[in-house]
Image: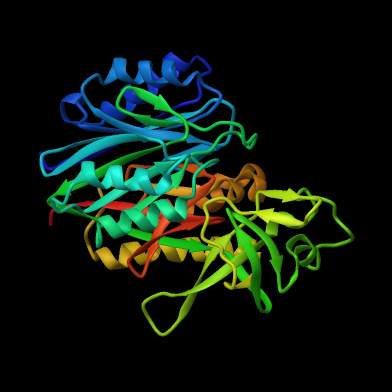
Amino acid sequence: MSTHSGVGQSTLEDARAAGFSAATSACSQLPDSTADLLIVFATAAYDQPTLLSGIREAAPDAQLVGCSGEGVIADNDSHEVDCAVVVMAMASDSIRAQTYLIEGYAEDPSGCAETLAARIGHEPAMGIIVFPDGLVGDCTSFLDRLNSALPGVPVVGGTSADDMQFSRTYQYGGDQVASGAVAAVVLRGAGRLEVAVSHGCLPIGTARRISQAGGGWVQEIDGRHAWSVFKEYLDGDPEDLNADGIVHLCVGTPIENGTAAKTMVIRTPMQLDRESGALFFPGGGLATGQSIHMTRRDTEQIRRSAEECARSLRQESGQAKPVMVLQFDCAGRGKIMFGGCAAGEIVEPLHAEMGSSIPWAGFHTYGEIAPIAGHPLYHNYTVALCALYDAA
């Protein structure tokens, strides 16, 4: 049989019917319509347990993993609406999947990583796909600890999201729905996982330095209130993060990428403390003394770099064709940036570059997870592509 996959989607408002329809459609594309693994992404407006019960009705015996998103990606579509669900179904006699749902991520991300690593064990793995809560928890600490415990195992994924209300997100594992947790699937067997990541940001001016930070908050940049530095790059005298142009403005942290060049990891603030001028960056990883660049997103660069991201995966694989591709794309790169044209700008070109017949699914995240130079990192305003290949 080797490995087969299929994608099903639904925008029905009834949670059970939507889950059942998407899962049935995905499984119908498999031999015997029987799945070993279901990867599920859905919007947060659904009653989440009811949604999973509909999916389980269609595929009661499959491993299941996933999370909520600001929107979902299915084949060439991007659905950033109240009700949308996508299911990627896989059946294989060469690739094995094991799913996990680890609670306690919000309170102890490092401990959560240790628990996950212990359950995964040290049997060789082609990769781990993770879906932490996107509103709580220090994702950088989680990834650092997971990488320390399982060195050399690629880690990719995205943090769960809601409908930009920043209220509550959901993680799925087996028949369970949780919040403040991390869902994960480890893949083993005769195959390989390839990952590529890109953003569309360009540095502005000279390097700056974080002069005070802690707990995700950046209080000062170059000895000044962080918000006062951000305002230099915005028109007028804005009072909050709803200012015109703020959607294009973010921070880049330069890192070595394994070559003589440096690359940027992009981060964006999500909260402002008006009294102190401090900015909150979810996901951790910004520290006192760190060098940063202010960066600005460019729509043409977003398109170009995303296509280059897909092209790099295709070129690395030679003639091989992936059995599935997962796309983890920032919620700030969908309709916020491209309006109703998001699918045509950030999904269709990438799908076409890799191969239009490849089963393709994903979601709009509150943070993307992808390695650079072998180390898993938390990103914002980024697309991460994860391609699964069967044994040669």
Residue at 36% in and 77% down: 258
The percent position of residue 182, horizontal first and vertical second, equals 39, 39
Residue at 46% in and 50% down: 139
Residue 266 lies in quadrant: bottom right
Residue at 31% in and 53% down: 387
In which quadrant will I find the N terminus? Answer: top left
The percent position of residue 75, horizontal first and vertical second, equals 41, 41
Left or right: 212 in relation to 121: right
- Whether residue 354 is visible, yes or no, is no
Residue 374 lies in quadrant: bottom left
Task: Look at the picture and state if 206 lies above or below 309.
Answer: below
The percent position of residue 187, horizontal first and vertical second, equals 22, 46
Total marks shown come to 0
Asked whether 206 or 225 is in front, the reply is 225
The percent position of residue 10, horizontal first and vertical second, equals 45, 25
Task: Look at the picture and state if 261 lies above or below 171.
Answer: below
Task: Look at the picture and state if 60 lies above or below 43.
Answer: above
Asked whether 51 or 226 is in front, the reply is 226
Left or right: 355 in relation to 338: left
Task: Look at the picture and state if 9 lies above or below 56.
Answer: below
Asked whether 152 or 337 is in front, the reply is 152
